[in-house]
Amino acid sequence: MTIEQTLQQRSGSKCELCGSDLNLTVYPVPPKSGDTAEECLLLCGTCQEQIKDPTAGNINHWRCLNDSMWNPEPAVQVMAWRVLDSLRAEGWPQDLLEILYLEPEVKTWAESLNQESSDDRIEPTKDSNGTVLNAGDTVILIKDLVVKGAGFTAKRGTVVKNISLTDKPEHIEGRVNGTRIVLVSAFLKKA
């Protein structure tokens, strides 16, 4: 059986991300070689085109990931995670990312392309003491910070777990009082 036939059978002849049955083709999930069905997806033309830059097309098309992210196939989980991660600034994808659990090896695969691009960063993100911060670290606020637009003050001593790095080395993202906010790394110390 060919890879395409295996994927057709696995997916019920539908796009594994959005469920469309139009223009289906095999898509190898990078950085894997695509030599086996486990390393590939069956995608419609719309998903194939929008995967190149998920923010460029109809962002609402990706709301389909609310369902497909629960697919038991690791390749589907990896692409769902990558698209949601690239759209996190939209708000709703961040909520889905927080509830999406990936096995450690699947998470490594999903993050592999992000790690390649983050290795190109010129400057690492550092806390107030000059300690390098990494995604997933826990930090503590060293100063009361007024959160504009959210109507509260993040108090000194507040612990922020599982931070995310941003494109700017002086900023991180984290959840304070149940709200995902951007924090200046100069007002944090690594826990």
Image (cartoon, rainbow, N blue to C red):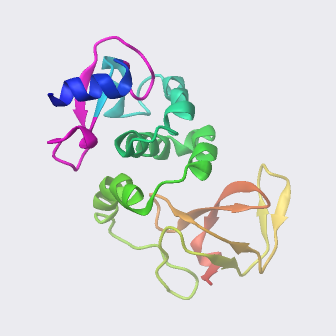
Pick the quarter of the image with the C terminus.
bottom right
Q: Quadrant of the N terminus?
A: top left
Classified by dominant secondary structure, the portion drawn in magenta counts as loop
Relative to 141, say whether 25 is above or below: above
Q: Position of residue 189 (x, y in %)?
A: 62, 83
In the image, is 188 to the left or to the right of 144?
left
Q: What are the residue bounds of the magenta stretch?
A: 14-40
Residue 122 visible (yes or no): yes
| Residue sitting nearer the eye, 55 or 70 | 70
In the picture as drawn, the residue positioned furthest to the front comes out as 1
Q: Farthest residue toward the bottom? A: 129
Point 39% across, 39% down: residue: 76
Q: Is residue 27 above or below residue 45?
A: below
Q: Nearer the viewer, residue 52 or 150?
A: 52
Relative to 8, residue 130 above or below = below
Residue at 45%, 45% in the rendered image: 81
Relative to 63, residue 141 above or below: below
Q: Quadrant of the rendered structure where residue 14 is?
A: top left
Residue found at x 31% / y 24%: 9
Q: Position of residue 37 (x, y in %)?
A: 23, 37
Q: Quadrant of residue 120?
A: bottom left
- The percent position of residue 177, horizontal first and vertical second, equals 80, 61
Q: To which quarter of the image does residue 89 belong?
A: top right
Closest to the observer, 104 or 85: 104
Apparent side of residue 90 relative to residue 68 in the rendered image (left or right): right
Residue found farthest to the top: 22
Verify whether residue 33 appears in magenta: yes
Q: Position of residue 137 (x, y in %)?
A: 55, 74
Q: Is residue 143 magenta?
A: no
Residue at x 28%, y 28% (from the top left corner): 7
* Any part of residue 48 in sight: no
